[in-house]
Image (tube, rainbow, N blue to C red):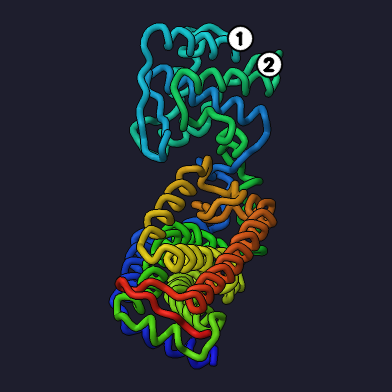
Amino acid sequence: MLGTLFRKECKQILKSMVYYIYVVVFVIFLSSQLRGDLTDHMERPLPDQENYGTVNSHEPEAVMGKTLAELVMETNRNSYATYPMGFYRGVTLNEQEMSEMISIIQNCTGKTWEALLEEMEEHFLQYDQSTIEGAMQAQSSYTVPVKSALSYQEFCENMEKVCEIIGSGSSYQKGSLEAGIGVPMTYEQAVEEFETLCEKDRVTGAVSRLFSDYAGIVLSVLPIFLGVTRCLRDKRAQVSQVVFAHEASAWEIIGSRYLANVFMAFLPVLLTAFVMQVPYQYHARTIGVTPDALAFLKYNLIWLLPEIMIVLAVSFFITELTENVISIFIQVFWAMASLMSSYTLVGGFSLKLILRWNTFGATREFWLQRQQLFLNRMFYFGLAVALILLTMAVYEKKRREGETLYGKIFKGRQ
């Protein structure tokens, strides 16, 4: 019975315009985000390169030095970038606030403000600021060391004062500092990163990870429309009485609907990932690396399938409970909150719905955080199962106790 109902549900989904809108929006979004060529990142670094990119560091000295460098530059411009609600908000200080900010910087560095400005100017004069590469290299290599007597705890306390002045959502708050800081990569580090990319990711793993990053954003919302549409379809067609009297159990009816929606929502994700990975499989072979042909499948199953499951489970449960579209608004709010709560675009998974890894590579860093990803997705997989079981209970309760439909009371199977 479950298999028969599952096939019928899949056929019904294929007749739905909402499903094709889902597919088109997903493909367009991913195509627009991954249209750049990643092959430039797949070449072995050379000893004489000017720039090898950056690597994330959690070393206190590096975090303090780069954070202070950013603070000095923003204070010099009197323009501070903050994202209190996930959207940019520039902050400009008055004279009193500026005086307090300079005092904090001087306390952290043990140098006068004038001396710091002079050092900053000397640093940037060493680079060709007329080119993008030169400007980026100058900024990435600029650092402001703290005074020797300053501990990391005292530094964090000073950054809390900075946040009190400029407000929330800045790169000086605790979460941002704990996420680490990007520091220039050395030649040795670049070679090691490249070799790790080839050995552990086998190129396609890094591509699949970046795909999952972007796909996770749009999949935090899109499947909700499939779920709501399916849950309200019987009521719009006024056939709930027929369905309620069906001999199939609530487990079979809700289970087949849910599994069909999960399968049909996941299918275009899987196919899109495969198509986008193919060119990089070819490029991997050209540099002597045997690509992981199943990387797209593994990352989709582990990273994206639990997200689709929980989004659909939320839509099924809330829609069956309330019989309206309120789950759409709840899911959009949840997705936005998850996206805005990220202090970094690379890792920091915790229990966020949307997992970010918005970089190509960083393989060693990912392997260090991989266990967090597994725990996160296992949590949402379990939560999705629990919500669907609750949905079945709600559905069965309606069948046995009756449901109000268009002003009439209908009694289901007894």
Q: In the image, is residue 223 above or below residue 230?
A: above
Which element type, helix, strand or loop, lies under badge 1? Answer: loop
Q: In the image, is residue 197 above or below residue 412?
A: above
Which element type, helix, strand or loop, lies under badge 2? Answer: loop
Can residue 348 be seen at all in this image of the molecule?
A: yes
Please, what is the three-letter code of the amino acid marked with disc 2? Leu
Residue in view at x 38 percent, y 58 percent: 326
Number of numbered discs visible in the structure rendering: 2
Residue in view at x 38 percent, y 68 percent: 228
Please, what is the three-letter code of the amino acid marked with disc 1? Gly
Looking at the image, which is closer to me, 257 or 58?
257
Residue density around tag 2, few if under 14, some if 14–19, many if 20 or more, within 10 Å: few
**Which residue lies under the disc numbered 2?**
150
Q: Position of residue 87 (x, y in %)?
A: 37, 39
Q: Earlier in the sequence, mark 1 or mark 2?
A: 1
**Which residue lies under the disc numbered 1?**
110
Residue in view at x 39 percent, y 31 percent: 128
* Residue 38, quarter of picture: bottom left
In the rendered image, the quadrant that contains the N terminus is bottom right
Q: In the image, is residue 33 above or below residue 152?
A: below
Q: Position of residue 300 (x, y in %)?
A: 54, 69
Q: Position of residue 163 (x, y in %)?
A: 50, 23
Q: CA distance from mark 1 to mark 2?
A: 9 Å
Instruction: Tell me whether the residue at label 1 lies in contact with that at label 2, contact meaning CB atoms closer than 8 angstroms.
Output: yes
Can residue 286 be seen at all in this image of the molecule?
A: no
Q: In the image, is residue 80 above or below residue 3?
A: above
Horizontal arrangement in the rendering, residue 127 relative to residue 190 (left or right): left
Residue in view at x 50 percent, y 62 percent: 212
